[in-house]
Image (cartoon, coloured by chain):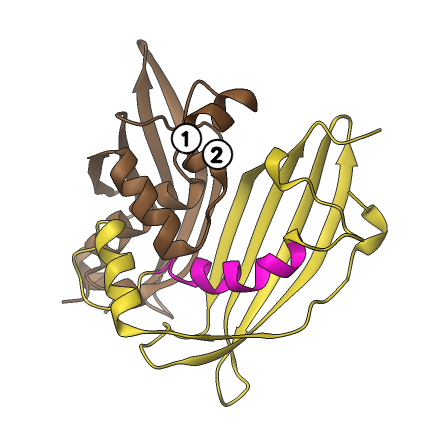
Amino acid sequence: MTRRYADVAVGEELPPLGRVVTLEDVAAYAEVSGDRNPLHLDDDHARRVGFPGIIAHGMFTMGHLASCVSAWVGEPGGVRRISAQFRAYVLMGETIVAGGRVRDLDPATLRATLELWVRCEREGQTEWPIRRGEAEVQLA
Amino acid sequence: MNVALEGKRYPPVRFTVGQVHTERFARIVGQREDGVSPTFPTAAEFAALDQVIADAELALDFERVVHGEQEYVYSRPLAVGDELEVVARIAKIRRRGALGFCTIETELKDGSGEVVVIARNTLVIRGVDA
């Protein structure tokens, strides 16, 4: 069921969606997306190019964010535009949490503009694998 | 990295939106609802990106590439069975200090010629040659 425009208010937060990122998931993502950059598959390579180990694809994290948005809208087809800026890496075993907030509502089109993010706690600090994400979604 | 190639367009690549493929993709990104995932077009982008990565004239060092930004704009949701023509173009290419920025805009057209999805992918190349 697509979320109803009448049930949404500016400032409303999307329920946060968390997941642990595993090597198995990232390897499966490499296959299904076609992005077989060794940065996401080969620990030695990742270290050689300056990371502490294998990192998740930015698009894996954005895919998780899109799932958070799809769950809130009620259907993936309601997402009419989505964008993300990748600002921190994600290591294997870390937990990413996607979230968002309704920034704007358009009564003429029944569309909402969402601001989006993905955060990750590392050594007592909050990192932002995705910042300044944005989506436009079609409500019912 | 050759900044003179802004505007270069690559030959179209065919990509079919398959049921098994979209279902596997949705499962891996944790999507519970039915329908093609909003970021599934990345698979079509990668089908066309191979030409960009292999382009000796552009000379992108893919080993030093990280993903900076990504955007998708949809005129309709993709559907299983869509036969797409995928065309990649170098929309913008810049050097700023030791970093290179390359935005690749990829159009996904359906059988009727309608642009269904526009994907904008900004790659950051770390440590480009001066």
Residue A84 is one of the magenta-drawn residues: no
- Is disc 2 in contact with disc 1, using a CB cutoff of under 8 Å? yes
* Position of residue B78 measured from the top left corner of the image (x, y, whole percent): 37, 73
Q: Is residue B77 left or right of residue B8?
A: left
Give the residue at x 41% y 36%.
A41
Q: Quadrant of the N terminus of chain A?
A: bottom left
Our reading of the magenta stretch's main secondary structure is helix
Identify which residue, B66 or A104, lies in the foreground: B66
Task: Name the residue type under label 1.
Answer: Ile
- Magenta segment boundaries in residue numbering: B38-52
Vertical order, A73 against B74 (above or below): above
User: On the image, numbered disc 1 is attached to which residue?
Assistant: A55
Residue B69: x, y in percent? 54, 43
Q: Name the secondary structure under disc 1.
A: loop
Please give the label number shown on residue B65: none
| Apparent colour of chain B | yellow
Q: Which mark is residue A39?
A: 2
